[in-house]
Image (cartoon, grey):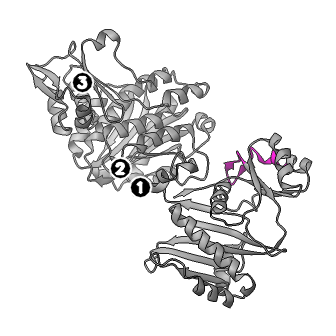
Amino acid sequence: MVRLYEYQGKQILRVFGVPVPKGYVISAVDEVPKALEKIGQSVAIKAQVLATGRMKAGGIRFASSVDEAVLVVREMLGRKIKGVAVEKVLVEEKLDIRKELYLSITVSDSYKVKGPILLFSTEGGVDIEEVAEKHPEKILRYPIDYAKGIDAAEISEHLVRLGLADTVDGLVDIALKLYEASKRYDAHTVEVNPLVLTRDGRLVAADCRITIDDSSVFRHPELGIEVPRDVARPLTDFERIAWKIEENDYRGVCYFMQLVDDVDEVAKGGYIAFHGIGGGACMLASEALLRRGFKLATYLDTSGNPTAFKVYRGMKIALALPGIEGYCLAGAVIANQEQWYHGFAIVKAFKEYSRYRPGFPASILIAGNKEAETHKIIREGLSGLPLRWELYGRERVLDVDFIADRFSKLLDEYRSEGPKTLGNIVDFVKAKRPSEDELKRCLWFKTSTGGEVYVDLGKCIAPDCGFACVKACRWMGTGALKIEKGRPALASRDPEALRRLCTECLACEYFCSSKGGNAINIVVPVYGLEDVVKKHIHLYG
């Protein structure tokens, strides 16, 4: 689920007629005087972070003058609240509070409900969980029939029994509006805590938390959500790039997150790139690594039968982080996906990366469908590379402690070699295309996600290779290549047809190389990665 900032939630509530405090979002200290000129001198200043418990963490403070507000904002901007840096604050009118209430519309996944539920409490604020636990008599839980909606009369009766007869009409009105907002925005939760009853009798949403279904983000471009993920902090440059891989390609998963969002911290060293296949397997294997003191910089999951392109791109982002000292693919699962696509991606990524970082340690555990073929691809493809690597299969799927121990030894050997002489990291991340002269000899086409397949007929050794590229394309793909007059040829002259025919499996490049032809170069750009690396180039040493 995607969490919205408080100010975004209040913008939605305002559209639906729910009263909210007058306020302005600011990101610089010099904006404070103008905000207070419109709001008044007595204000609440609230850090905009996607975390609960801001009040106790110092993320909500008050001021009664411009000078005081400037001081608070200056101290708050850039500070970390609940581990998240504050980039914006909401400055809004301070309410004269008589009583704090709680109201929310939440989709319940309980087997008894499986639908929206209205939750109301006669007490709200920072300790609402404690109220729900110790004083259930103060809580109203009302399952909503999605076909009928909220029965206003029935809700009114419940609220009267809770002792709120004086405000029942206002509460019912807000509940109905919250429900409409939740439906319109595909929300999992619309929570107002506290819903304030002011001394002059107004009901005002003093705080707001909204989460929406990440699959519905495309329906709400006005929210400006760049990446539909439940992340409590701003995304890093590397994470934004990784999302672009996933955004327009639903063939399998390429889920990438930085476990250490501060790139400067990773660059200090001591971190490894962690890669798993399947969420449960990832947790099992990562826990074994953590027990041995490893620090994981990345969480990369490539499951659900992704293309080789997706696996390769994910690996390239993980390996491009500055300071990474090792790579561990812990596929602690016997997967039903065809694992040779992982094999092709692993070989291509490390052929490129080992030139930048010779001797780099890599532990690879991969099992499942096409396991034997995959291991053969990896062993032959990595053979002779300046890489320190080990490969394991299904016999070690449940023995992740063994994998962690072996990886620890590989890493110790690597570190014992002392300071490293590194290659050009920009050369590693850059998409390398043929020269103009080489291009004249090439058959080439673009794939569905922007890859480019080049077949250099000047380097082609067909038929001596047995047309390895064409066989691979037809066996592991859908036949973008064919044999014509004793040479490889494109299966269609229509660029759109070729995009559809190429399943981005990398097989033709691998088998051409394995036969000694080296005639095929597949360019798989990771859009934006070169720019991000250059931005942080001072961290690579």
**Residue 115 image offset from top left, x and y in percent:** 47, 74
Task: State the separation of the CA atoms marked 3 and 1.
Answer: 33 Å
Q: Earlier in the sequence, mark 3 or mark 2?
A: 2
Q: Residue furthest top?
A: 437
Residue at the spot of label 3:
513
- For label 1, the SS is helix
Q: Amino acid at mark 3?
A: Ser
Q: Earlier in the sequence, mark 3 or mark 1?
A: 1
Q: Magenta stretch: residue 76 in it?
A: yes
Task: State the separation of the CA atoms marked 1 and 2.
Answer: 8 Å
Going 57% across and 47% down the picture, which residue do you hit?
224
Q: Amino acid at mark 1?
A: Gly
Residue at the spot of label 1:
279
Of 343 and 422, nearer the camera is: 343
Give the side of residue 343 with respect to residue 43, left or right. Answer: left
Give the side of residue 156 with respect to residue 149, left or right. Answer: right
Asked whether residue 184 appears in the rendered view, the answer is: yes
Quick check: marks 1 and 2 in contact, CB under 8 Å?
Answer: yes
Name the mark on residue 303: 2
Residue 55 vs 111, above or below: the answer is above
**Residue 506 image offset from top left, x and y in percent:** 27, 33
Going 62% across and 40% down the picture, which residue do you hit?
262
Task: State the separation of the CA atoms marked 3 and 2.
Answer: 27 Å
Residue 322 vs 489, above or below: the answer is below
Please state the extent of the stretch shown in magenta in the rendering: 72-88
Q: Quadrant of residue 312?
A: top left
**Residue 190 image offset from top left, x and y in percent:** 59, 66
Of 302 and 78, nearer the camera is: 78
Q: Magenta stretch: residue 216 in it?
A: no
- For label 2, the SS is loop
